Amino acid sequence: MHPAPSVIIFTTFSGLGFGLLVFLGLGLPPVTGWVAFVFFVIAFALAVGGLLASTFHLGHPERALKAFRQWRSSWLSREGIAAVAALIVMGIVALLAVFFDSRIAALGWIGAALSLATVVTTAMIYTQLKSVPRWHQALTPLHLVSASLAGGALLAGQITSAQILLALAGLIQIAHWARGDRRFAEAGQSIASATGLSEAGRIRAFAPPHTGTNYLLREMVHVVGRKHAQRLRIIALGLGYALPLGLILVPGASHGLGGLAVLSHLLGMLASRWLFFAQAEHVVGLYYGARGERIGAC
Amino acid sequence: MTSLPETTQRKLGLVIDLDTCVGCHACVIACKGWNDAQYGAPLSDQEPYGANPTGTFLNRVHSYEITPPHGQAQLVHFPKSCLHCEDAPCVTVCPTGASYKRVEDGIVLVNEADCIGCGLCAWACPYGAREMDKAAGVMKKCTLCVDRIYNENLPPEDREPACVRTCPAGARHFGDLGDPDSDVSQLVAARGGFDLMPDLGTKPVNKYLPPRPKDQWQETDILAPFLDPIADTPQGFLGWLDRALERL
């Protein structure tokens, strides 16, 4: 799939932002006043900034409000509703904490639940797609949610939670890659099933339907940069999970080290998210001869 | 509403005969010609006469080489457009309700005024049947020529999809695949029509008819043994001429 900067930035930053909102909603840390102001500004900037980035890839962003209508069937619509609801509830929590030095625990929990729900719905947009076998697996929501919570814990300065969550998220990341590498073969689609011509003999894509390229190839049969995949995985794992974990394990870690851990985590997650899209293969590629010479290989 | 209807009254769709398709791409051009000026935004091209021409098409013809275990390789031309699936994954993912499946005839359509151009439906479609128009920023797809098939301003013989109407090989058929007695259903039954990627559970309405096995070379070769050269080296006068010329 095409690793569009808008969706990479959106999923990375808003994932981090909503992860932080989960912890702020739970009162971890129980901040009020100016400290709360700084925490909420960071959380809202990440969450809202990510959501705004996601509108950049729309053909008609001015019609975005229409996307709230189909929550009955569409995960994208549910995501929009969950995000707005989470931002409103957490906005009230933030107002109370910053200006009135008060916290209503129940409201915070609702905001935390809605923030978590937003990340889950984002994950389900990808998980639901049978046409992209790498994403269509149970580990996809686990991966995106665990990464979001680990980043949130890191930003919220919850050292113990962050240690556990970073380790857990790193393991889920590895599992998601390992399983993902096998998913296309497991899904069982090939040029034979795509064309239905398996009984006739060995099939080879002879000529594409056009001399140039098209939307489908640009959007879904993107193959640029896969050769660096292993290197990028090591970078994603190192910067996204291992280095931040190491930095916060330093006894009496300062804000400086914490900031470095957050920055490292962010860079690692950007690499991870780039791979999430770039390595995902859409079955429509089969019609264009993708995997044709490598049937059975991953 | 982007929830799918439980059932549709009819299942209009295409039957594509891979045995007779000659790969002329006339259906591609007829489709583009009709849909460029009718339903919704025109099908734009980018750099049509430049170095990297691309454009929006609702129907594309692939070509595949099939090598059977015995005999000659065979070229199969493979037109592909929206299959108007009964369980269309493109419809349910739509956040705005722009994508919908019609209850009356099962046609999957996009209401372009509601389309935000998010592209998720194109991701959800395993067949590559949807293309985002770069100029209009909305999703385009086969409408099964909904503006032809019911159009009483057209003569009756033209009330079928442009691709079907134009096909010079008669490789495309249009009809109600929900009615077991319809011509297209009978054709599918007789020829062993099949679905594309059936395991994905999309239940496509459009069916494909397999290419018939080609005649074997050996079977048409009854007289060939009589045409074999009788002698490798010429005899008599020709033999003398051959040797004389050799010596020169």
Image (spheres, rainbow, N blue to C red):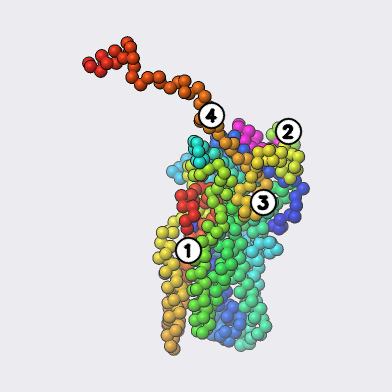
Residue A186 appearing in the image:
yes
Q: Position of residue B117 (x, y in %)?
A: 60, 55
Residues B9 and B227: in front is B227
Residue lying at the far top in this picture: please name it.
Answer: B237
Q: Amino acid at mark 2?
A: Pro
**Res B181 quadrant in image:** top right
The residue located at (31%, 14%) in the rendering is B239
* First in residue order: circle 3 vs circle 2: 2
Spatial CA distance of label 4 from label 1 is 55 Å
Instruction: Kindly identify the amino acid type of the residue bearing the numbered disc 4.
Output: Glu
Which callout, 3 or 2, points to the residue nearer the camera?
Answer: 3
Residue of label 2: B156
Q: Is residue A257 left or right of residue A214?
A: left
Tell me the residue at 65%/41% (across/down). B192
Instruction: Find residue A142 and report its horizontal and vertical position in percent.
Output: 57, 71
Q: Are marks 3 and 2 in contact (CB under 8 Å)?
A: no
Front residue of A130/B104: it is: A130
Residue A9 vs B116, above or below: the answer is below
Per the image, the residue denoted by label 1 is A275
Residue at x 50%, y 38% (from the top left corner): B70
Q: Position of residue A42 (x, y in %)?
A: 53, 77
Q: Note whether residue A44 is visible.
A: no
